[in-house]
């Protein structure tokens, strides 16, 4: 007798033999028991999970000589002919090679005639999505008003390619990928029957490689028996199919979480030299980190502070998988992606930073961080001149005292303006007015958003260590920009550079229009302080939300601590 491959030899012949599709089997068995048989069925799902097998079993159940039954006898003539594929009443058609409208028209003529021996004439069309639009249109009328003796079974891996008018006339069943445990159980049964000794880790490796398809797993086992005979180990499976061992995956995952770049790169080099499937490696790593993420929430296997890191790692791996599909340099993409994952695993999350700040403040300790140098504390404010009512409403709030900061490590700091004896207020005001274009340009390099607003302002007075800036009433809305501590400090730093001493600034509405400021910025060499380039300000946000958030104590603490501002509000 000719050799029969395992996938055909172990093809399900009864509903009880079907693996992993209990929801479909139960529905069909109940339909047979109650004689509620539809005219058309559509089975959807990936390859090798039992779509066509279920259709054949259902065909036997409908035409078995013992009657409508969920357990066909497999011994009568009708059952044997359907199993052998030569029944006159069961037509199994490949949609890929019979997709023309003329062939569907021939099918319509065939179904007009009564079945030869069974109760029904059964039409099974595999990969039905391959039919042309004309063929679907020719089939539509028959599906809508089929003869009572005709039943259709459609199978497809791509249901989105089937017209909605066809799907709406079928009972649709979505078959699932089969779980690894169920595949392992079936493979162990087959190996025992075939008298093959196979390691448990080898069965797991085959199940992993099959991606939920039992037929693929059975074909892989058949290939391994031909390769190694009656004794199969995990190393044999990994060698034949280019998979990575579970131990290596765990080591690579631990290296990523520990931020060990050298270890990660070394593992990738070893796997590439061994000829492993690098894209498959990305998918298995992503599956492993997904399991860790689920474990944090379900079994309490990890700290919930790890959630953000795991999410970032999964995002990076998903992007790498998408790019590797179209790249010839898979190793380079994999290495760069894993390095980014290792870096993401060591970056502190925002929740951790806030928790540390709150803990240190609660203990009365000193906050240790690498921060920008604290500004010189301003002198006691001097009584300022009276401002119009609108100015009083929009004047900047008093600046909070800067928290103590101990620098984590010495860093190069920009030179501070050297405090010098104050010149007469009139002379300083004249100096500011003369050099106002330079002040505007310098402040704009620190905080881009203020440059346009300062062009509509002018120095009004210098009183002690306070400089009063007037805005034209036409541009009153621009005063809100200076509620930001970052923007205020940019202006104060620029004023201090010109006056050669620390000063603070107030912003108010004036009576006269501000003089026009030239667009050309002043040469940079005239300044003693160089600020780091600032990022462009984001698009305007809803001020109501930003103002509400600013009133929250924890937000105020963070803004004051880092000299920050709210750039976006997301709800």
Image: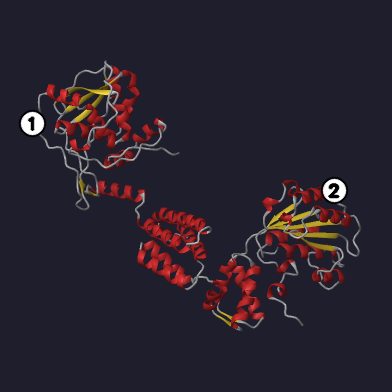
Is 463 located above or below residue 245 in the figure? above
Residue 380 in the image: state x and y as whole percent: 15, 30
Q: Which mark is residue 506?
A: none
The residue depicted at 67 percent of the width and 80 percent of the height is 193
Residue 522 in the image: state x and y as whole percent: 23, 32
Horizontal side, residue 117 vs residue 38: left or right? right
Is 285 located above or below residue 315 in the figure? below
Horizontal side, residue 515 vs residue 127: left or right? left
The quadrant of the rendering that contains the C terminus is top left
Which of marks 1 and 2 precedes in the sequence?
A: 2
Picture quadrant where residue 343 is located: bottom left
Is 277 located above or below residue 27 in the figure? below
The quadrant of the rendering that contains the N terminus is bottom right
Q: Kindly give the residue lying farthest to the left in the view shown.
A: 421
Of helix, strand and loop, which one carries label 1? loop
Residue 457 in the image: state x and y as whole percent: 27, 23
Which residue is labeled 1 in the image? 421
Which residue is labeled 2 in the image? 145
Horizontal side, residue 103 vs residue 528: left or right? right
Horizontal side, residue 320 vs residue 1: left or right? left
Q: Is the residue marked by circle 2 packed among few (<14), some (14-19), or many (20+) residues within 10 Å?
A: few
Q: Judge by depth and name the residue closer to the eye, 168 or 403.
A: 168
Of helix, strand and loop, which one carries label 2? loop
Q: Judge by depth and name the residue closer to the eye, 154 or 340.
A: 340
Q: In the rendered structure, are the residues bearing label 2 and label 1 in contact, judged by CB atoms less than 8 Å apart?
A: no
Picture quadrant where residue 131 is located: bottom right
Q: Kindly give the residue lying farthest to the top in the view shown.
A: 511
Q: Judge by depth and name the residue closer to the eye, 493 or 143.
A: 493
> Can the viewer see residue 488?
no
> Can the viewer see residue 181?
yes
Observer-side mark, 2 or 1, equals: 1
Residue 462 in the image: state x and y as whole percent: 16, 24
């Amino acid at each position: 007798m000719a050799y029969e491959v395992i996938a055909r030899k172990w093809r399900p012949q009864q509903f009880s033999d079907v693996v992993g599709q209990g929801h479909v089997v139960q529905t069909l068995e109940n339909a047979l028991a109650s004689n509620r048989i539809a005219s058309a069925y559509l089975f959807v799902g990936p390859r090798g999970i039992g779509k066509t097998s279920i259709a054949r079993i259902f065909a036997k159940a409908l035409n078995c000589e013992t009657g409508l039954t969920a357990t066909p006898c497999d011994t009568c003539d009708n059952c044997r002919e359907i199993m052998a594929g030569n029944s006159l009443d069961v037509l199994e058609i490949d949609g890929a090679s019979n997709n023309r409208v003329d062939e569907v028209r021939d099918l319509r003529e065939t179904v007009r005639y009564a079945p030869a021996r069974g109760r029904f004439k059964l039409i099974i069309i595999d990969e039905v999505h391959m039919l042309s639009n004309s063929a679907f249109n020719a089939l539509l009328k028959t599906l809508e008003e089929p003869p009572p003796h005709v039943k259709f079974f459609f199978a497809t891996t791509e249901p989105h390619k089937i017209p909605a008018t066809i799907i709406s006339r079928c009972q649709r069943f979505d078959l699932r990928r089969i779980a690894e445990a169920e595949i392992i159980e079936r493979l162990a049964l087959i190996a025992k029957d075939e008298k093959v000794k196979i390691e448990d880790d080898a069965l797991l490796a085959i199940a992993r490689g099959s991606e939920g398809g039992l037929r693929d797993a059975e074909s892989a086992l058949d290939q391994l028996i031909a390769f190694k005979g009656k004794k199969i180990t995990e190393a044999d499976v990994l060698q034949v199919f280019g998979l990575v061992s579970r131990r290596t995956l765990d080591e690579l995952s631990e290296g990523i979480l520990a931020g060990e770049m050298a270890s990660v790169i070394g593992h990738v080099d070893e796997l590439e030299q061994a000829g492993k499937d690098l894209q498959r490696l990305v998918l298995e790593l992503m599956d492993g980190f997904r399991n860790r993420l689920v474990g944090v929430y379900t079994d309490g296997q990890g700290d919930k502070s790890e959630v953000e890191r795991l999410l970032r790692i999964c995002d990076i791996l998903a992007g790498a998988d998408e790019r590797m599909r179209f790249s010839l340099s898979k190793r380079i993409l994999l290495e760069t992606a894993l390095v980014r994952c290792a870096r993401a695993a060591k970056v502190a999350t925002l929740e951790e930073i806030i928790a540390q700040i709150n803990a240190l403040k609660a203990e009365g300790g000193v906050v240790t961080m690498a921060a920008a140098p604290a500004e010189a504390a301003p002198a006691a404010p001097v009584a300022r001149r009276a401002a119009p009512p609108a100015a009083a409403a929009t004047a900047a709030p008093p600046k909070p005292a800067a928290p103590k900061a101990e620098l984590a490590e010495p860093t190069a700091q920009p030179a501070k303006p050297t405090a010098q004896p104050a010149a007469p207020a009139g002379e300083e005001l004249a100096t500011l007015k003369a050099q106002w274009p330079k002040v505007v340009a310098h402040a704009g390099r620190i905080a881009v958003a203020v440059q346009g607003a300062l062009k509509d302002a002018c120095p009004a007075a210098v009183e002690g260590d306070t400089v009063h800036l007037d805005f034209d009433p036409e541009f009153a809305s621009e005063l809100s920009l200076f509620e930001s501590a970052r923007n205020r400090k940019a202006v104060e730093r620029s004023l201090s550079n010109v006056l050669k001493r620390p000063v603070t600034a107030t912003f108010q509405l004036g009576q006269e229009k501000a003089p026009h400021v030239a667009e050309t910025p002043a040469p940079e060499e005239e300044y003693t302080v160089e600020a780091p380039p600032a990022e462009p300000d984001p698009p305007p946000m809803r001020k109501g939300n930003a103002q509400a958030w600013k009133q929250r104590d924890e937000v105020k603490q963070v803004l004051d601590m880092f000299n920050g501002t709210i750039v976006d509000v997301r709800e």
